[in-house]
Image (tube, rainbow, N blue to C red):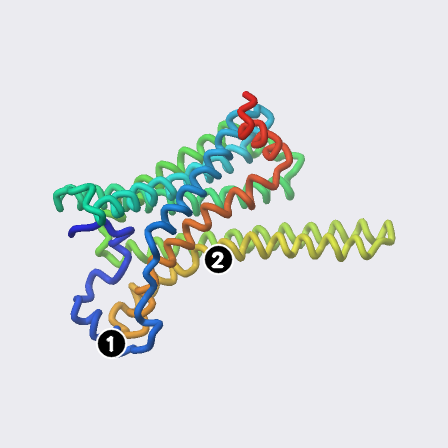
Amino acid sequence: MSTLAPLRLLREPWNASEGNQSNATAGAGGAWCQGLDVPNELFLTLGLVSLVENLLVVAAILKNRNLHSPMYYFICCLAVSDMLVSVSNLAETLFMLLMEHGVLVIHASIIRHMDNIIDMLICSSVVSSLSFLGVIAVDRYITIFYALRYHSIMTLQRAVVNMASVWLASTVSSTVFITYYRNNAILLCLIGFFLFMLILMLVLYIHMFALARHHLRSISSQQKHPTVYRTSSLKGAVTLTILLGVFFICWGPFFFHLILIVTCPTNPFCTCFFGYFNLFLILIICNSVVDPLIYAFRSQELRRTLREVVLCSW
């Protein structure tokens, strides 16, 4: 093993030999079976952009006491999770570039240990990022449907317990995954976790959108302004589409890849799909870039603090 490989444990089925893989690829035919070679520079650029964005979010939340609330703490944890994705990606990409250009020469056994550590970081950040997306959805649901009791339901102590639980579960699950990655049950657990988060977010956000439409309909009927109702409903539908669309587009292909590893590891067409694994990683990194735009930068208070942070007006 001469170079690092991002999440090599999931790149292709462990129980499919190289001969079977090559034969399957040849059998499927077609240009699309050649896979996609993503340049390391693209990984590096997206990782740097994500790292800077999420660092700004964390700095803004820590700086402004008005943002010291459970909702913004969850957004801060999401930013830290996305930063872990960026840092692990940057570290791996830099090592790959240095080794490709002969600047860095490392023994194969050391590379394997580094690969395990970086894969553990990536797995931990993936689980924690998905978890905090779900936690933010639940928090918003409580804010809307239990507004008067929100502060008694989501106390600071409960928020800290939730955050600590997510980080602990992410660390343990990533360790278990690296240790038992050859077991399909582990992959099924990851797939089940993703489907659970997808369904949870889908149900909560659609329910919130339905309630918002109901309130807008009531207000417009009383004030006799149907245009306002249609405009607000359209904005709500666009927001809902962005939230769920970005989540599904960025995470869906990666977990579909895992489903194919479990269900059809030697099928020619599945084998062709495995060749696009780097593209799926790029989409996950893109999610780390987009998350601050969706969950953080839409807050006027946070944007104001960000301007202060950027201008160094501490």
Q: Look at the image and tell me whether residue 296 can be seen.
A: yes
Task: Establish if 109 lies above or below 11.
Answer: above
Q: Amino acid at mark 2?
A: Phe
Q: Nearer the viewer, mark 2 or mark 1?
A: 1
Nearest to the observer: residue 250 or residue 96: 96
Q: Residues within 10 Å of mark 1 (few under 14, many from 20)?
A: some
Nearest to the observer: residue 7 or residue 156: 7
Which quarter of the image is occupied by the C terminus? Answer: top right
Q: Image point 26% across, 61% down: which residue?
A: 12
Q: Quadrant of residue 84?
A: top left
Q: Quadrant of residue 282?
A: bottom left
The residue identified by callout 1 is: 26
Position in image of residue 128 (x %, y %): 40, 42
Which one is earlier in the sequence, the residue at label 2 or at label 1? 1
Nearest to the observer: residue 33 or residue 242: 33
Task: Establish if 69 lies above or below 99.
Answer: above
The residue identified by callout 2 is: 248
Q: Amino acid at mark 1?
A: Ala
Position in image of residue 47 (x %, y %): 40, 44
Q: How many marks?
A: 2
Label 1, secondary structure: give it: helix
